[in-house]
Amino acid sequence: MRNNSNTDFFAKQDKARKKTAILFLYFIPAIIITVLVISIFIHLFISSPLMLNDFIRFYGGYQVDNSTPWYRPGLYLWVLSIVTWLVIFSNLVKIREVSRGGGIAIAEMLGGRVVNPGSKNPGERKLLNVVEEMAIASGIPVPMVFVMDRVEGINAFAAGFSPEDTVISATMGCIRYLDRDELQGVIAHEFSHILNGDMVLNSRFIGMLHGILFFSLLGARIMKVTGKPGDNAGIFFYIFGLFLQMIGSIGVFFGKLIKCAVSRQREFLADAYAVQFTRNPMGLAGALKKIGGLRGGSRVYNAYAEIVSHLFFSNGLRQPFMKSMATHPPIEDRILKLDKYFDGTYPVMNVYSDLDEDPFGDAVTYKNKDIDKKHGELSLEASGGEEIVRKLDGSYIIGSISSTIGNPQANHILYASALISGLHDKVAESVHDPYGACAVIYCLLLDKKSEIRKSQIERLKRYSDNSLMGDMKKLIPLIDSLGRETRLPLVDMAIPSLKHLSRVQYVAFRDNMKRLAEADKKVSIFEYTLQCIIIRCLDPLFLKSAPSKSVYYTIEPIILECFELLSFLSWHGTKEEAVSDKSFNSGMAELQNKGGYTILPIEKCNLKTFDRALKKITAASPGIKKRVLNACSICVAVDSKITINEAELLRAVADSLGCPLPLFFQNYNT
């Protein structure tokens, strides 16, 4: 199977944007043909003397002159204008509806039920844990998880306009029939769509398709509400609806043709990335084989399945007569790419028994698996902010940071799995409950100094109830015992639970978070990074904040901000002036700047300046963001080590720029 790992995150996102533009160009002739044909039909229908006579006789009791001309240019232009407006309007409304509702709107449209993050159901717990470890390994917020309870086929999809509003939805068949390795393969496939930028493309598909399908859907609706026995006028409209649906099928045909051509290409690529991610091709192949052996296969019975069929892991519709009309490659072809010894025999399907299964599956054994030796030994030494992720070859660290953005490896999954399975039961239970997640975040923000911590707790008591304070009392010693490297993954795990808060509760939580962080009159790097993650993930949902748009397409308008950003990063990896100078100069050289900047004095480098600079850089184009992130990576790694402070700052930068940065992991063989 072809490996595309050399394509970086930014190149994949840029390719996805170009495909969206090309897709729009494909849809233009399809829309024009559909509009013209439907306009001609409606014009002829309403201008036909026979139709007019029938209609007026039903309602007015008299007839019109049969000499009325069939073709009237003025009427046709009016019809054409109205039809065009309706297609464009329905397109924009659906795109707005999907973009505002995000992945949640699409999941609910398909009858999905949100899975409680604290669910005790073994099958749901297994699904939640697989999604959780994939998200943490990838460096993206843990998505909300949905289950389509009424769908027995094996299928799944990812939907949303950004990683922050992404959801993962799986059918009941996925839970019932797949073991953990197979489920992991399916979810890895969906995560590859997220990381490759396919989600935005797929979500915009829905809006474009709805515009083309509008009149076919309208015709079906007219037929449904009219045509009652004995109602002559109703029969008139029923016939109109029937013809409208038939003519509208032209749009259905063109829409499916375009959708299927693009979708099939992406499925093979997603399979390849899933294998690269998990290093277990037989898991994904096993899921596909079970689809082939299941009577219902991957079929999704839902009125909206046609519109969103390109989102599915496997074909969710009836097998089309022509291969060109299929949204997915044939199951056999996909399996053979993964298992060249496949002989075409599918397994006999039985419900997978997971009642006594550890939801972490093989996660507890990951510590004993060999991690690729060529990656060297990376370790985290537990102390107070100067701990380092060490590698002798600095050039490797620089290269690996850039190459793993949006392109996580199997090692990241192993590390994420071990982190999650190593959590104390009370911490794991709390982080999967909305109020418990609030308590976990508050505990993470408590200062190590007893007098400051006491002040924080007293302040929190004024704005929180007794039950939350009781939870915190139990959690504090457990959270304090966690290594620094575990804390940001714990924040990521809390995101889905926090999404279940009400708007009022979220605002109160956000205010409390800020109070705790600022209790000692200064904000630490960890506190800053934590707030960056929470605000980026949850503000759009609760406060409807709009994402920043690209306004800077060259480095010059933001070079001063890059100078401030790199100065701050350079001083927070070391206190040695010579090393800081080297880090800063190396980072600025990556930006190809000839302005002769020298590093800011350490006393002028503060988080307020860093935050202001970062907010302006978020409005840069993707190409400029890539250069900035590369410069930051070089800056922190040029001395052949990365401190946890640097790792957290780099995560804050990547998160603010919308780039999924995988974990800096330690080698469990050490």
Image: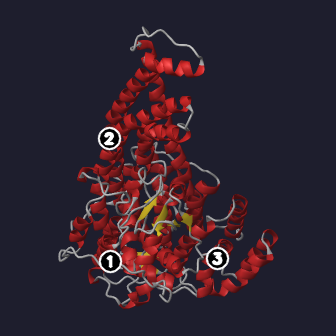
- Give the residue furthest to the front: 230
Q: Residues within 10 Å of mark 1 (few under 14, many from 20)?
A: many
Task: Give above or below for 89 relative to 272.
Answer: above
Q: Amino acid at mark 3?
A: Val
Percent of width and height locating residue 539 = 61, 56
Q: Verify CB contact (< 8 Å) between mark 2 and mark 1.
A: no
Label 1 sits on a secondary structure element that is helix
The front one of 158 and 252 is 252
Q: Residues within 10 Å of mark 2 (few under 14, many from 20)?
A: many
Q: Amino acid at mark 1?
A: Gly
**By what rule are the colours in the image chosen?**
secondary structure
Q: Amino acid at mark 2?
A: Phe
Q: Which residue is mark 1?
A: 283
Which circle's residue, 1 or 3, is located before the other in the chain? 1
Q: Which residue is mark 2?
A: 254
Q: Quadrant of residue 1?
A: bottom left
Report the residue at 66% width, 87% height from top: 477
**Circle 3 or circle 2, nearest the eye:** 2
Which circle's residue, 3 or 2, is located before the other in the chain? 2
Whether residue 345 sits left or right of residue 546 in the image: it is left
Task: Give above or below for 612 relative to 520.
Answer: above
Report the residue at 42% width, 42% height from top: 208
The front one of 601 and 28 is 28
Task: Give above or below for 257 relative to 194.
Answer: above
Mark identifier at residue 481? none
The front one of 372 and 218 is 218
Q: Quadrant of residue 446?
A: bottom right
Label 3 sits on a secondary structure element that is helix
Q: Residues within 10 Å of mark 3 (few under 14, many from 20)?
A: many
Q: Which residue is mark 3?
A: 440
